[in-house]
């Protein structure tokens, strides 16, 4: 991998989750592979037309528009970082617009489904886990990383995504 990208990923790792760093690594790797960049100079010299070609390529692979947007965002953030550290003057992704995606309405479990989940719990620990997932809306990682010290004054303090 190009040294400057590796340096960027190490910087990202300081305040982002391992999952985010992994997603950025994959996204930037895909970008570098598409253009077959071998050094930082070639990476610095792309233009808006190249960015649009990359976006079109991602669409042509059959990815969902939301996935294409995510890959583009990953690279766009990297180029914004390069602007921030004054390696480049302007990001070639600066004017790149997201692809329009359909808005999906959230889906909810019915009372019967909630009852079925709760009823399927055979151990008290399972019941507590299921109750937290269903009533507090915790993500899996938030639940897994929950500590007794996160329970304060009858409340659960969650330091998770967002």
Image: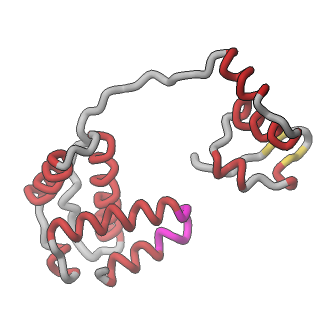
Q: Judge whether residue 17 is colored magenta.
A: yes
Residue 157 vertical position relative to residue 110 in the rendered view, above or below: below
Q: Is residue 154 above or below residue 102?
A: below
Residue placed furthest toward the top: 111
Determine whether, in the image, residue 129 is placed left or right of residue 66. right
Q: Give the x, y percent position of residue 89.
A: 21, 69
Q: Residue at x 42, y 72 (%)?
A: 9
Residue 52 on the magenta segment:
no
Rendered residue at 70%/37% (across/down): 133
> In the image, what residue occupies the spot 77% across and 28% down?
118
User: Which residue is situated farthest in the left direction here?
Assistant: 49
Q: Nearer the viewer, residue 7 or 35?
A: 35
Q: Main secondary structure of the magenta part?
A: loop
Residue 125, x across and y down, in percent:
85, 43
Q: How many numbered circles are shown? A: 0
Residue 139: percent from the left, percent from the top? 63, 43
Give the image location of residue 80, x and y in percent.
31, 62
The magenta span reads 11-18
């Amino acid at each position: 991998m190009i040294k400057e990208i590796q340096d960027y990923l190490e910087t990202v790792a300081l305040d982002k989750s391992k999952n985010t760093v992994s997603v950025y690594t994959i996204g930037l790797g895909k970008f570098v592979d598409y253009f077959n960049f071998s050094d930082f100079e070639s990476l610095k010299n792309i233009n808006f037309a190249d960015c649009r070609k990359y976006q079109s390529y991602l669409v042509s692979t059959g990815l969902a528009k939301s996935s294409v947007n995510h890959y583009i965002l990953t690279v766009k953030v990297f180029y914004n970082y390069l602007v921030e550290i004054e390696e480049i003057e302007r990001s070639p992704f600066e004017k790149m617009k997201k692809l329009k995606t359909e808005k999906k309405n959230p889906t909810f479990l019915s009372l019967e489904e909630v009852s079925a989940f709760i009823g399927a719990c055979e151990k008290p620990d399972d019941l507590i886990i299921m109750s937290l997932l269903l009533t507090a809306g915790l993500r899996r990682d938030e639940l897994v990383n929950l500590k007794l010290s996160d329970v304060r004054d009858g409340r659960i303090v969650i330091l998770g995504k967002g």
